[in-house]
């Protein structure tokens, strides 16, 4: 694959990961999340491509 493509993909995915973690941590601080478990879902779409990618998982609140 093209180097420019790889770099733009990595930059985008890093931004998604960092900003998503910050958003989740902020919401967990604002909620009474101790001992609770949350089902999480991310839906990725790309304008101009026929793409919908869904990732699901579980996030546990801090004890």
Image (tube, rainbow, N blue to C red):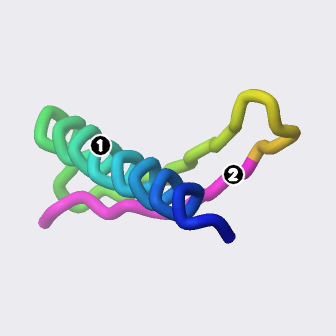
Write down the residue under mark 1.
19
Q: Looking at the image, which residue is at 14% across and 33% down?
A: 30
Q: Looking at the image, which residue is at 16% across and 62% down?
A: 62
Q: Which residues are magenta?
A: 53-63
Give the x, y percent position of residue 52. Answer: 77, 43
Give the x, y percent position of residue 36. Answer: 30, 56
Crowd rating for badge 1 (residues with CA inside 10 Å; few <14, some 14–19, many 20+): few
**Does residue 17 appear left or right of residue 34 in this picture?**
right
Q: Secondary structure at mark 2?
A: strand
Kindly identify which numbered label has been placed on residue 54.
2
Q: Secondary structure at mark 1?
A: helix
**Is residue 15 within the magenta segment?**
no
First reached walking from the N terminus: tag 2 or tag 1: 1
Q: Nearer the viewer, residue 4 or 39?
A: 4
Q: Looking at the image, which residue is at 35% across and 47% down?
A: 15
**Is the C terminus in the top left, top right, bottom left or bottom right quadrant?**
bottom left
């Amino acid at each position: 694959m093209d180097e420019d493509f790889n770099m733009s993909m990595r930059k985008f995915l890093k931004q998604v990961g960092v900003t998503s973690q910050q958003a989740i941590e902020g919401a967990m601080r604002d909620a009474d999340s101790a001992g609770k478990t949350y089902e999480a879902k991310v839906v990725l779409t790309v304008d101009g491509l026929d793409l919908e990618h869904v990732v699901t998982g579980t996030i546990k609140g801090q004890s």
